[in-house]
Amino acid sequence: MRPEEHQEIRHLHLFRDMLQSSFEALMHSARAERYPAGRELIRQGDPADFLHIVIEGAVELYARWEERETTMAVVHPVGSFILAACIRDAPYLMSARTLGPARIVRVPAPDLRAVFRRDPEFAVSVINELAGAYRAVVRHAKGLKLRTSRERVASYLLRQSRLAGNAPTYVLPVEKRLLASYLGMTPENLSRTLKALAADGVVLDGLRVTIVDRDRLAAVARPDRLIDGPDPDATNAGASLPPPASA
C-alpha cells in the first residue's frame, strides 16, 4: 500500500484517534487491490471477513430479496464499509459492487476486533461511527415511511444543496437509477417527479440541479431537523448517498 494511502485512511474519523501502534498493526495486515467496474466485493449472507475502505472509485451497497433489489448507500473515497458486521463477527446484511474502476483496501475483521478490544480510543471511534450510521438509517427510514415520493425528492434536493454550502447549483453525486432506488422509487417515477418539481423551483439538466426558488421547493419538502438534519456524524458514516459535486 502506498504511504499516502496510509495518511488518507488515518484521517478517517474511524482511525484518526487510535494509537499509532494499533493503526500500524491494522495497516500491516491490510491489502490494497484494484477492481474493475461491476465487481461484486461482498455478498449478503456471507461471513464478514474484511472491513473495506474505498480509496479510489465508488461502491454501491445494495440488498436483494426474492426478485427485488434496492440501493442502500454509495461509498466514495475515503470511506469504509461494513463496520457493524465486522465488529460483531456476523454475516453481511448487504452486498457491495464497484460502480467503476476502484481501489479498495481490505482490513481483516479479526485484526479489527482485536484492536477494538485493546485500544480504548479506537473503540470510542467505532461506537461513534456505528451510532452515526444508525442515526442515518433511522432518518432515511422516517423519510421513506412518512413522506410521499414528491416530498422525498424535494427534501433530498434541498439537503444536497445544504451539503454543498447552500449552493443553488450542484451536480448529483450518483446516476438517477441509484437515486431512485435509494429513495424507494422506480426510475420512471423519479423522472416524473423531477419534471413535476420544475413548477416548484427546480431546473434539471442531466445530473446538474439548479434551485431557482428555494422557498417554493421548501414548501413541498417541509424540512424537519429530525429527518433532514443536519447531523454531521450520520453524514460521515457511509450510510447514505455521498454529498454533491460542485457545479
Image (cartoon, rainbow, N blue to C red):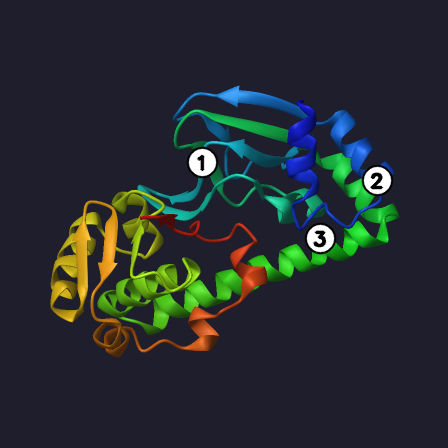
Q: Residue at x 47, y 76 (%)?
A: 226
Q: Are marks 2 and 3 in contact (CB under 8 Å)?
A: no
Can residue 134 be seen from the camera position used here?
A: no
Distance from the alpha carbon under mark 2 to that under mark 3 = 16 Å
Query: Total label count?
Result: 3
Which label number is shown at residue 20? 2
The kind of residue on which mark 1 rests is Ala
Q: Secondary structure at mark 2?
A: helix
Q: Residues at badges 2 and 1 in contact (C-beta under 8 Å)?
A: no
Image side of residue 186 versus residue 38, left or right: left
Q: Is residue 207 above or below residue 154?
A: above
Split into 4 quadrants, where in the image is the N terminus? top right
Location of mark 1 (residue): 58
Mark pair 3, 1: CA separation: 22 Å
Q: Which residue is mark 3?
A: 126
Q: Callout 2 environment at 10 Å: few (<14), some (14 to 19), or many (20+)?
A: few
Say which of 99 and 15 sits in front.
Answer: 15
Which amino acid does the dot numbered 3 rest on?
Val
Image x and y of residue 161, in percent: 35, 61
Can I make out residue 68 in this image? Answer: yes
Residue 85 image offset from top left, x and y in percent: 63, 45
Res. 213 image quadrant: bottom left
Instruction: Select label 2 or label 3 by which is in front.
Output: 2
Q: CA distance from mark 2 to mark 1?
A: 28 Å
- Residue 197 marker: none
Left or right of 175? Residue 165 is: right
Is 94 above or below relative to 204? Answer: above
Q: Determine whether, in the image, residue 45 is placed left or right of residue 241.
A: right
Q: Is residue 217 above or below residue 178?
A: below
- Kindly identify the amino acid type of the residue bearing the numbered disc 2: Gln
